[in-house]
Amino acid sequence: MQLWAAQLGLGSDGTRVRAEIMDSDLFLAEEATVRRRHGALSFVLGLQLFVDEAVVSWSGAYYMYPIRARVVNIRDRQVQWVTVGYIPHVGKSVARTAAARRLASDKRNAMLQRCLAILLRRFVGASQDGVPITFPGQQHLIAVPRIVSLVADQLGERAVMCLMGNACEFFCSHCMVRRTVAGGPRGVGAAPRDVTAVLDAQLDGAITRDRDPRPSLRKPLAVEHSALAFVPALGAVWGLATDNKQLFNIISFDLLHVWKLGVVRMVAQRFPSFLHAACNGKNARLGPLSDSLEALNLRAWEMGHLCVPSPTPPGYVVSLLLHASHPSFRALAAVRCTLLCTLRNHSTGASIPRGSVRMY
Amino acid sequence: MEQDVPSHADAGNGCWLCWYCPRILMSRASRSRHMSVRHAGSNRLVPPDAFVELHDQAPSSARPPAVATGGPVVEDADTATPSTAPLSDVSGDDERHPVLGGLGVVGVPPDAYSTGALPVLRRRNVFLTSTAARIRAYFEAMPEASATRRLVPPSVGQRASRFDTPVLREALKFALGAGGKGMSEADQMKYLSVLLLVEEGGRAQRRRGRRSAPRPRRVPPPASSAGEVLVESPSPVDGESSDEDAGDIARAFPTPHSFLAAGRQEQRRVLSKLCWDVTPLEVEGATYRFYSRDLLLAALDMV
């Protein structure tokens, strides 16, 4: 257990060396603010939150996904994530109308924020006042809880912050770079998002939406901020919308999660070429390339409908690969293992972030 | 503007306690107005029998009874800064949680929703212009704010666990975690049957091993007691009762159904001990149930 951040060391080239999230600028700034406000005997109780709708689980009765938390002050080697809530999953609309889609989207966004608000009820008050703690044999200290990191993929990040999806004009959660200039030299100097302005607009939009759900009233919010007419519950936590206004700076990503998704994507991109070579002769079990692709697509569609949390790999993929007698299958055994492990971990929700990284 | 005051400042003559709730107000008019709004159905002409004005109470009993659980709220500001409030006074109003056993003493602010009053750990500077305060107020106004209930009653968490040996704990862990989501109830019963058979097999093997051991010799009769019935000296192993011979699992769960029921009880006990809550949420006409722990308590528990 480490209460206060240690002094940053210097590397061989004179740069500051950071090893943990407690060495980050965000944590150091919050610590300075907390000790200035609550006295020298106070410390920041930093929390990381992990939200990922991809690890949704179905128990037969409930369809929900977990939200996990971790205290960054605990500095043992075993990173401990604790599940603190299960958010009900709201599926897509069955009807393919704009009104039905909007209703389902509103339901999903409102559900997430209201669940977060329930989760944070005491935390919000404590982030402002602190919690007195007396460690055995030590003097009285004040723990001031702070959210220092939100680990989520981009969809989760935009949902928690009540921002529109990644197809909107201002698709970056940190800055106001426009879609047309992002990635180019003109997008480098984009202004950061104004936390207070966005939250105020979202709060006004949410109050308006509660009274009148017409989508036309939400247009200005979408045009100006690419934001939804919901207010993020995290904004009530002290330090995120006050003082240093770190609301958008806490967004982090899970390196393992990104890596795994990247592996799936890379394998999927190379799979057609591989199939082209594998199905070239008459040895392919499912026939020529077009038939094999159709069979694969059918299996993928079935997997999307039948996917339940299970540690066992999808049997049809295994049988498909194992029954093929082409020699190149043996050479790709390692790729297959990687793919299966990735699918397995991803489908079982075992992707607990063990190496969450934030770039400072 | 509604603000809290430190609890050690509530015994002054300018404080008027509400007759029906722990709220403290700065004037009689404020109290009358408060009671007309919040306690419109109650008698506002005559105070209840047991009621004593705040300034008439003894110093030791100046704090209203509900302060220890909820804390009063005063509709005016105070000038003390948070950092100057003494810690000993601050921790006096705190709610002690047995789950936070790793720490010495932890003062967790009481839940405003369950007590009907805002926490009064120390004075809070609530700025009406603060975006954070507005967001907090927005969510506090939601209908589910006071609908959170404990998923399992707290008394269940105080019971002793029936899985009190390492073997039983490992068996339960395997039954509930095998395959990622645990065994089905039917599989759990089969699993216990297998465990009982294994235990029985181990006992049978021990018995066979004992049979193969040399039989105890008969004690030769003393010369003076010739003619008496010879008695085989009892073996200490053979003299054990069947209960003592049974293994841990067979002793604790003689039937598969008892294992199943005990597993359910253990789940409820742990859920109660970890303070899991359930909140019904009505969103766009549909009702959902949100299962959660209090984030602050969970964080302090981790520490």
Image (tube, grey):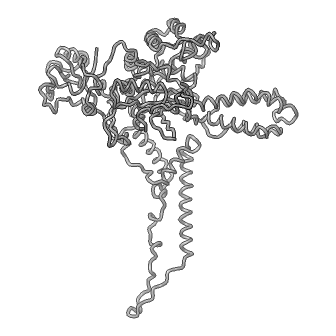
User: Please, is residue B183 above or below residue A119 in the view?
Assistant: below
Q: Residue furthest front?
A: A13
**Residue A148 percent coordinates (x, y):** 47, 27
Q: Is residue B142 visible?
A: no
| Quarter of the rendering containing residue A122 | top left
Where residue A204 sits, quadrant-wise, is top left
Residue A296, quarter of the rendered image: top right
Q: In which quadrant of the rendered image does the C terminus of chain B lie?
A: top left
Q: Is residue A291 left or right of residue B7?
A: right
Asked whether A219 or B223 is in front, the reply is A219
Q: Does residue A6 appear left or right of residue A282 in this picture?
A: left
Pinpoint residue A290: horizontal percent, then vertical percent: 81, 26
**Vertical order, A203 against A272 (above or below):** above
Q: How many marks?
A: 0
- B26 or B224, which is in the foreground? B26
Q: Quadrant of the N terminus of chain B?
A: top left
Q: Nearer the viewer, residue A92 or A176?
A: A176
Q: Outermost residue, right direction?
A: A281
The location of residue A348, given as percent across then percent down, is 60, 36
Q: Is residue A202 visible?
A: yes
Q: Nearer the viewer, residue A352 or B78?
A: B78
Q: At 21% across and 19% down in the image, what residue appears?
A: B25
- List x then y, in percent, for residue A312: 64, 40
